[in-house]
Image (tube, rainbow, N blue to C red):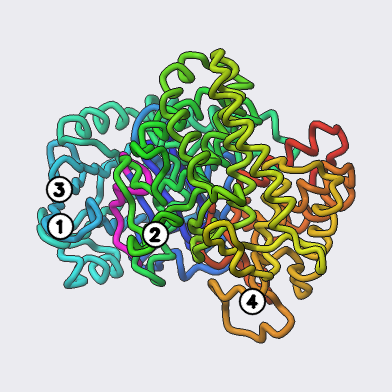
């Protein structure tokens, strides 16, 4: 489980429950990872001849406040504190170490780099002129140094496991260089010092930063400035710890080029040899909408500037992208491409247009609208044309859960919102012919939702339907929380009887009675843990639970909304991180932590409640 997330947009690090760095990115978050999957940047303490890795110390305390992580533990009559942050202007991770107690102390840092995502051709060496250890491959460089002299160092082959055992007697062998698959370690013989890791694209850049930061006054100034920056940036939300932390998490995921990856936690790689470190336009758009609601427009503009460059000539977005903007991996087969289906998730295209309209309403950013309007035109025309001529419903694409091909209620709702948003943007520019065409199509889609997607017998919208040349050939009656898209995209008023009855069915069928929260859908098998799932629809998800909370807030049922927000606060990690989902027995995170979309929905819910001036923080 990840307990710490630190980032300045170009350098990011995630820590585990032992305060070990497990994920390290630079300069594109999600794409350029430099850690060994399953490996750990470990920390050891040597005290008067005794040695321990901090993983073996019991009763560790780890906290995260804004972008300041703190570790505290006691061992062998020592009081050990470490505080970490990533500097705001420079790609530098800084750790302040303070150890109190009698005797001689050495702190050993083990580095498990795998540069550029593969463990071939790395070099690690000790540079005596700088008193620093470097790891490099091509244009990727990391330098490790301290405000105190390095007491001992070593480098060696990770694949031969020579460095870790060398640490455990507290004496490092001073092997000056190693190449191939390599690790390194340094020790600092002091109870009070700063340790730091500098990233850069050349030896010269890293060297200059090390020289500047080795001056303790400089480093202390940058350290305090950086922690103050993140504390102040979220201070408006300080009445709710999770909302404030969500601001920092969301902003920290916005990359230097505007990319917003879904999650940087690579522990998911054990399931399918892939990660969540991609730009999903949908997830990123919801994150941007949450930040726009909170007023952070200058950050989200970078995302909108990037995402409009990703649209293809046909007017739609691919499933997901690498942070650089190239296509990400996919499992949507090209064999299903036909005149009535595409291997995309159409809601991603629609949601980006919808999100941009909300951004424009708040910013009046005519400059970006001018640059992106041709793309918006292509996207809107695609959504108009990619419909069944008779039913007026969108044609088949994959659902937001990325599992099924069909005409999904959630997707259809997003297309309605995307077309209406495009129409509003066209009106801003006086493009009334386009505006009328897109608004008319949106109204047709909404009427088709009313006519074809509601199951009157059960009082709930279908999850999806299959269509063929003006006929519905089959319906999927699975109760699915994604039906809340009808509310999220403002298709109908919250008092619409079809929506009211749908929410009642969702609460009845998808509420997880063991620990609370709302599952994605009936018989959801994704990320199940060992245990008896009889009567349990699936793992509870944060975003689905918060969708319903937002619905109740919109209706004025603030007590119910607070109750669902309280559940989220109950299952958050002790460091205020939100996972994708939790198991239904102990409420522990499964899948990735943090998931950006979870934090976005919490922030959106909090702001909705705060506007009513009735929200009492947990």
Residue 46 seen anywhere in this rendered image of the structure: no
**136 horizontally vs 434: left or right:** left
How far, Cα to Cα, is label 1 from label 4? 56 Å
**Residue bearing the label numbered 3:** 137
**69 horizontally vs 496: left or right:** left
Q: Nearer the viewer, residue 575 or 111?
A: 575
Mark 3 or mark 4: which comes first in sequence? Answer: 3
**Residue bearing the label numbered 4:** 523
1 and 3 marks in contact (CB < 8 Å): no
Mark 1 or mark 3: which comes first in sequence? Answer: 3
How far, Cα to Cα, is label 2 from label 4? 24 Å
Q: Nearer the viewer, mark 1 or mark 3?
A: 3
Residue found at x 52% / y 33% = 227
Q: Nearer the viewer, mark 2 or mark 4?
A: 4
Mark 3 or mark 2: which comes first in sequence? Answer: 3
Which residues are drawn in magenta? 26-38
How far, Cα to Cα, is label 1 from label 3? 21 Å
Q: Is residue 107 above or below residue 149?
A: below
How far, Cα to Cα, is label 3 from label 4? 47 Å
How far, Cα to Cα, is label 3 from label 2? 23 Å
Q: Is residue 196 above or below residue 222?
A: below
């Amino acid at each position: 489980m990840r307990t710490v997330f630190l980032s300045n947009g170009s350098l990011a690090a995630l820590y585990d429950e032992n305060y070990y760095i497990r994920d390290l990115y630079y300069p594109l978050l999600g794409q350029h990872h430099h850690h060994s999957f399953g490996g750990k940047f470990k920390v050891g303490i040597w005290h008067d001849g005794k040695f321990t890795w901090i993983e073996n110390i019991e009763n560790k305390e780890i906290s995260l406040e804004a972008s300041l992580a703190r570790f505290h533990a006691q061992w062998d009559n020592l009081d050990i504190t470490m505080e970490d942050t990533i500097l705001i202007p420079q790609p530098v991770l800084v750790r302040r170490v303070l150890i109190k107690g009698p005797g001689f102390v050495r702190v050993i840092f083990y580095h498990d780099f795998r540069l550029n995502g593969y463990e071939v051709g790395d070099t690690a060496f000790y540079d005596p002129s700088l008193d620093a250890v470097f790891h490099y491959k091509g244009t990727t460089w990391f330098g490790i140094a301290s405000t105190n002299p390095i007491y001992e160092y070593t480098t060696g082959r990770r694949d031969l496991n020579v460095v870790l055992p060398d640490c455990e007697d507290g004496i490092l062998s001073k092997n000056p260089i190693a190449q191939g698959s390599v690790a390194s370690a340094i020790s600092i013989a002091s109870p009070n010092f700063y340790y730091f890791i500098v990233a850069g694209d050349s030896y010269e850049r890293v060297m200059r930063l090390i020289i500047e930061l080795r001056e303790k006054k400089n480093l202390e100034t940058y350290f305090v400035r950086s922690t103050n920056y993140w504390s102040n940036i979220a201070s408006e939300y300080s009445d709710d710890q999770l909302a404030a932390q969500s601001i920092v998490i969301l902003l920290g995921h916005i990359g230097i080029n505007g990319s917003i990856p879904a999650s940087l936690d690579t522990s998911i790689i054990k399931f399918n040899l892939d990660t969540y470190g991609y730009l999903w336009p949908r997830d990123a758009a919801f994150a941007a909408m949450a930040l726009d609601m909170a007023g952070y427009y200058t950050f989200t503009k970078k995302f909108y500037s990037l995402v409009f460059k990703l649209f293809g000539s046909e007017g739609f977005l691919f499933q997901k992208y690498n942070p650089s903007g190239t296509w990400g991996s996919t499992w949507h087969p090209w064999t299903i491409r036909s005149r009535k289906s595409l291997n995309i998730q159409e809601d991603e295209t629609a949601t980006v247009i919808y999100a941009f309209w909300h951004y424009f309403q708040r910013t009046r950013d005519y400059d970006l609208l001018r640059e992106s309007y041709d793309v918006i035109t292509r996207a809107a025309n695609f959504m108009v044309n990619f419909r069944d001529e008779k039913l007026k419903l969108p044609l088949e694409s994959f659902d937001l859960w990325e599992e099924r091909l069909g005409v999904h209620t959630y997707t259809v709702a997003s297309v309605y919102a995307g077309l209406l948003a495009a129409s509003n943007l066209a009106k801003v520019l006086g493009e009334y012919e386009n505006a009328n065409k897109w608004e008319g199509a949106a109204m047709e889609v909404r009427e088709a939702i009313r006519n074809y997607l509601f199951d009157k017998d059960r009082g709930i919208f279908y999850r999806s339907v299959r269509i063929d040349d003006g006929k519905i050939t089959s319906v999927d009656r699975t109760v699915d929380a994604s039906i809340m898209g009808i509310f999220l995209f403002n298709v109908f008023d919250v008092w619409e009887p079809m929506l009211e009855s749908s929410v009642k069915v969702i609460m009845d069928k998808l509420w997880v009675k063991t620990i609370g929260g709302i599952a994605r859908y009936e018989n959801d098998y994704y990320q199940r843990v060992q245990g008896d799932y009889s009567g349990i629809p699936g793992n509870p998800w944060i975003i689905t639970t918060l969708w319903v909370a937002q619905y109740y807030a919109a209706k004025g049922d603030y007590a119910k909304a607070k109750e669902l927000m309280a559940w989220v606060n109950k299952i958050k990690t002790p460091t205020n991180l939100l996972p994708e989902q939790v198991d239904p027995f102990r409420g522990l995170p499964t899948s990735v932590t943090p998931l950006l979309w979870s934090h976005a929905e919490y922030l959106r819910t909090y702001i909705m409640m705060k506007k009513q001036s009735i929200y009492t923080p947990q």
